[in-house]
Image (cartoon, rainbow, N blue to C red):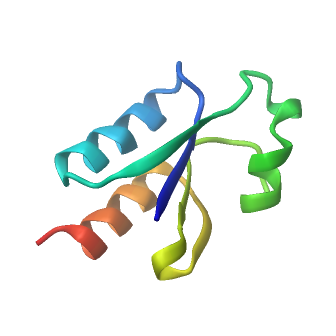
């Protein structure tokens, strides 16, 4: 199961969502606060407050951040 923590105005989040859609992957989106100090859920997962953050329970990913790393992971793991 894929989960993506995003902030709607974030261009890095849109980049990751584009790749998820391009690969035809199902995922759940969690919208987080615009204010970083209110992102406790994200901080618990990844140790920081930036988005996007990816959780992939099927592959043991508990809080990957950095959009370029997420895109590379998705392509490596799910691209056929």
Q: Is residue 31 above or below residue 24?
A: above
**Identity of the residue drawn at 38% across and 44% down:** 16
All told, the count of numbered labels is 0
Q: Is residue 41 above or below residue 65?
A: above
Give the x, y percent position of residue 50. Answer: 68, 42
Q: Is residue 53 above or below residue 57?
A: above
Left or right of 6? Residue 35 is: right
Using the rendered view, name the quadrant where residue 39 is placed: top right
* Quadrant housing the C terminus: bottom left
Using the rendered view, name the quadrant where residue 74 is placed: bottom left
Give the x, y percent position of residue 13. Answer: 47, 36
Closest to the observer, 44 or 25 = 25
Give the x, y percent position of residue 34. Answer: 72, 21
Give the x, y percent position of residue 33. Answer: 74, 26
**Identity of the residue drawn at 52% across and 54% down:** 3
Left or right of 51? Residue 4 is: left
Q: Is residue 42 above or below residue 61?
A: above
Left or right of 35? Residue 2 is: left
**Identity of the residue drawn at 35% across and 56% down:** 71
């Amino acid at each position: 199961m894929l989960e993506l923590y995003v902030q709607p105005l974030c261009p890095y989040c849109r980049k990751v969502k584009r790749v998820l859609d391009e690969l035809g992957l199902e995922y759940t989106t969690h919208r987080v606060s615009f204010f970083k100090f209110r992102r406790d859920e994200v901080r618990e997962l990844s140790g920081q407050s930036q988005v996007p953050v990816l959780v992939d329970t099927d592959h043991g990913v508990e809080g990957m951040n950095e959009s370029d790393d997420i895109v590379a992971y998705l392509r490596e793991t799910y691209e056929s």
